[in-house]
Amino acid sequence: MNPIVLIPARMAATRLPNKPLADIGGLPMIVRVLRQAQAANIGPVAVAAGDPEIVAAVEAAGGRAVLTDPALPSGSDRILAALAVLDPAGVHDVIINLQGDMPFVDPAVLSACARQLADHADADIATVVAPEASSADRSNPDVVKAVLAMDPGGQGSAQGGRALYFTRSTLYGDAPVWRHIGIYGYRRAALEAFNAAAPSPLEQREKLEQLRAMELGLTIRAAVADEAPISVDNPSDLQAARDHAEKN
C-alpha cells in the first residue's frame, strides 16, 4: 500500500469565508492541518487548493499545493484533480482525504484510517468515528451517526468495524453511538468510481455523500478515535480553536 494524503481547501466557505487562511495561534489553519498530516508519516502530503492564496500560504510554510479549478463542486473532485497533477502514473494506490478544517487532528487518527485499508483487503473506503460527546448528539441532525458492525475484541487504536449505514436521524438503545468524522481513505479505484457516479437517492435524502459509495456496493470500514477532533465551520468554532491553541 502506497498512500498519499490530500487536503482539499477553498476560500469560498459559506459560513466562514477565507477559512483556510484564518489565523490560529499565529499560523493559517491550512498550515496547521498540513503539519498534522505530515506528522502522521504515512505518505507525501499536499493541499488541493481552490485558490492561489491557499497555494501561497502552503508554499510559504514549505508545503506542497496544487491549484485546482475553483468551480469544482466537491472536495473529492478537488483531490482527484490534484492527484492527476501529482501522480498521473498511479503510483499511489490509496488516497487519504483530510478536511482542511481540522487544525489539531491527531496524526494517529490518520494512521488508524489508513490501517483499516492495510488490514482489510475487502475494504474499498476507510473513515473514522468517535464516541458521542453527549446524549444530545443522538438527536442532533448536525451530528452524523455511523451504524457499525464492530469487530470482535478490538481495543484502543485497533478498534474498528464495517459501516452498515450513516444517518442524521436519532438512534436509540443502549449501544454506543458513533459520531462520524469526515476523514476518508480511498483505494484509487473506489475514489474514481465514487466520483464518476451521480448522487444517489439515499445520499440526496440524508445529504451524506458517503451513502453514494454504499449504494454503489463499496465496502466502508471505520477506525475508532478517542474523541472527535476540533472542526472549524463557523466563527464560534474558530474562537474555540484559537482558545485551544493558546492553552496548548
Image: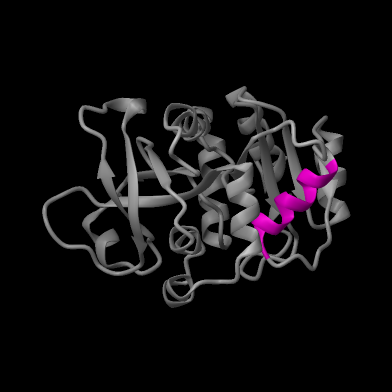
Residue 22: x and y in percent read: 70, 52
When asked about the image quadrant of residue 235, the answer is bottom right
Residue at x 47%, y 52% (from the top left corner) = 218
- The residue positioned 88% from the left and 53% from the top of the image is 52
Q: Is residue 78 magenta?
A: yes
Q: Image quadrant for the N terminus? A: top right
Farthest residue to the left: give it: 174
Quarter assignment of residue 39: top right
Q: Residue at x 71, y 39 (%)?
A: 31
Residue 100: x %, y % from top left = 64, 48
Return the residue nearer the eye: 97 or 214.
Answer: 214
Front-most of residues 110 and 231: 110
The answer to whether residue 55 is magenta is no
Does the magenta stretch mainly form a helix, a strand or a loop?
Answer: helix
Left/right placement of residue 39 relative to residue 86 reads: left
Between 32 and 165, the residue placed more toward the observer is: 165
Region rendered in magenta:
74-85
Q: Is any atom of residue 28 visible in this view? A: no
Residue at 21% from the left image edge and 32% from the top image edge = 152
Q: In screen coordinates, is 68 left or right of 156?
A: right
Is residue 183 visible in the rendered image? The answer is yes
Q: Position of residue 171 (x, y in %)?
A: 22, 63
Q: Is residue 7 above or below residue 93?
A: below
Question: Is 64 on the left or on the right of 248, as rendered?
Answer: right
| Residue 118 falls left or right of residue 23 | left
Residue 115, percent across and down?
Answer: 47, 28
Name the image colouring. Answer: one colour
In this rendering, the count of numbered labels is: 0
